[in-house]
Amino acid sequence: MKISKAKKRWGIIVLLLAAIISLAIYPLPHQNPIQYFERESGQLKTEKVAGEKWLVWLYYNPIGEATLWALANRKLVSSIYGNMMDRTSSAKKIKPFIEDFDIDMSVAQEQEFKNFNDFFTRKLKDGARPVDTCSNIVVSPADGKILAYSDISNSDFIIKGYRFNISSFLDNPDLAQKYHDGALLIIRLAPVDYHRFHFPVSGDLSPNKKINGVYYSVNPFALRKKAEIFCLNKREYAIISNPLFGDVIMVEVGATMVGSIEQTFKGSSANKGEEKGYFKFGGSTVVLLFEKNKIHIDENLLVNTAKGYETSVKMGERIGTDTHSWLIKEI
């Protein structure tokens, strides 16, 4: 008895679906936990990651990787999710999120929020993040976890074998030439962090430059698999011209499920610690670039990075000083 063509087609479809389902539920490879140094105590901590199983599935499962391609390359997907976080119905997610990640809400200006993004982009009370106002000090532009490199030309970035491509990152070979042997600081904001970013130094500002890109996650689980993410994601930057630190490039990098990067600062000159903008829902990153010999990064940040660990920082706290002041102190 002959099998009809229709039955054959359905048989093939069923086999394909079975294969896809098998791949989708295929056991995920073990991932080492994300560890970082808590700067205040000097202790090595393990980070609790929002959506950890989902992230590992996206980057380490064949079907997950196919899904990732659709998520990362479609602004619409991230925008839709971002818009969902603007709905009043999303407010019910706030309390469980605060409790699950033990977020200190005593420093927030407001305690009631109309939706999840309202909570996510919350402002802090005055003085909640003291800013080191000394003119020769660079402060962290955000709450997060930092990696620090004193000379990009001598450093492999994140994963051994991938060198940070500053020309691709800035999408400007001529500008990149000024920083090819300069310093690099990367501050990663997890979804649980305060998500407003501030100026690390004072100075005159260039107009903001936008670079189109995709929307990969910036979580270390993702970076272990795809180290060039920072040169692929959507990003924006401005140059802060400072008498001591030269032309400092401040870059905001978007990521999967980041609704948008919002620039709130208006003007051509900024003071250290002033708000520059904020990220809507999602994990994000701020990158700082300094010209050669313009900054001496705090030693503990460099040592921890050399060991392969991030260090937790708060917005406004010192992360480096100008080279001249550091040399005088050493002498």
Image (spheres, grey):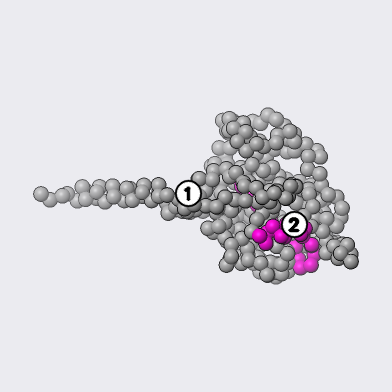
Question: Looking at the image, which is closer to me, 331 or 90?
Answer: 331
- Up-down relation of residue 261 to residue 228 (above or below): above
Task: Answer whether residue 297 is magenta in the image.
Answer: yes
For residue 142, say whether it is visible: no
- Which image quadrant is residue 241 in? bottom right
Q: Provide the secondary structure element on which disc 1 rests.
A: helix
Q: Residue drawn 67% across and 62% down?
A: 306
Q: Nearer the viewer, residue 9 or 244?
A: 244
Q: Is residue 123 left or right of residue 330?
A: left
Residue at 81% from the left image edge and 47% from the top image edge:
131
User: In the picture, residue 91 is in which quadrant?
Assistant: top right
- 209 lies left or right of 50: right
Amino acid at circle 2? Asn
User: CA separation, marks 2 and 1?
Assistant: 34 Å
- The residue sitting at 78% across, 36% down in the picture is 125
- Check disc 1 and give the amino acid type: Trp
Residue 205 in the magenta stretch? The answer is no
Q: Residues within 10 Å of mark 1 (few under 14, many from 20)?
A: many
Give the left or right position of residue 227, taking residue 289 as reference: left
Q: Which residues are magenta?
A: 283-307
Residue receiving disc 2:
300
Q: Position of residue 162 (x, y in %)?
A: 58, 66
The C terminus - image quarter:
bottom right
Residue labelled with disc 1: 57
Q: Residue at x 85, y 62 (%)?
A: 326
Indicate the secondary structure of the residue bearing disc 2: helix
Residue 247: mark: none
Marks 2 and 1 close (CB-CB < 8 Å) = no
Packing grade of label 2 (10 A; few <14, some 14-19, many >=20) is some
Residue 92 visible in the displayed image: yes
